[in-house]
Image: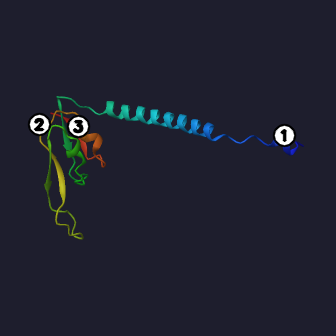
Amino acid sequence: MRSEETSLRPMTKASDLAARRAAEKQRIRSAMNAVKAEEMAAIKGGAGTVAFVAEGACIGCDQCTIVCDDDAIELYDTPLASPILEIEVNRKARILREPCTGCRLCVLACPTDAITMIDR
């Protein structure tokens, strides 16, 4: 059986712990950036495409209009399709085909994945 003295390990120094945490943070960030790059590459885009909004999935959050540099997205009011809730304003996004350049920023910004890219 080992004695108490030989079984005790020295405590990790705060500087060592901070260095390990920083390295792990960098590893995780690199992995997440790689996944995001793969997602971006998988989304078609460019001059031959235009964004399309699935109205049922759109929550009118305005995130797409914030990131759109082409002013190709507008929000419009539509009645809420619920007999239970009474909400005065129910907004949805609409893509304006002509100014849309197919940059895909709105697709990445949409929290509900309501926007996809389609061929013109």
Closer to the eye: label 3 or 1? 1
Q: Which residue is mark 1?
A: 6
Q: Kindly identify the amino acid type of the residue bearing the numbered disc 3.
A: Met
Q: Secondary structure at mark 2?
A: loop
- Which residue is more in the foreground, 21 or 30? 21
Distance CA(mark 3)–CA(mark 2): 14 Å
Q: Which residue is mark 3?
A: 117
Residue 23 is situated, as x and y percent measured from the top left of the image, at 54, 34
Residue 119 is situated, as x and y percent measured from the top left of the image, at 18, 33
Distance CA(mark 3)–CA(mark 1): 64 Å
- Which residue is more in the foreground, 71 or 85? 71
Q: Which residue is mark 2?
A: 99
Residue 24 is situated, as x and y percent measured from the top left of the image, at 54, 36
Of marks 3 and 1, which one's residue comes earlier in the chain?
Answer: 1
Q: Kindly identify the amino acid type of the residue bearing the numbered disc 1.
A: Thr
Q: Measured along the vertical axis of the image, is residue 107 above or below residue 93?
A: above
- Which residue is more in the foreground, 65 or 84? 65
- Please identify the quadrant where the N terminus is shown: top right
Closer to the eye: label 1 or 2? 1
Residue 105 is situated, as x and y percent measured from the top left of the image, at 25, 38
Quarter-of-image position of residue 80: bottom left
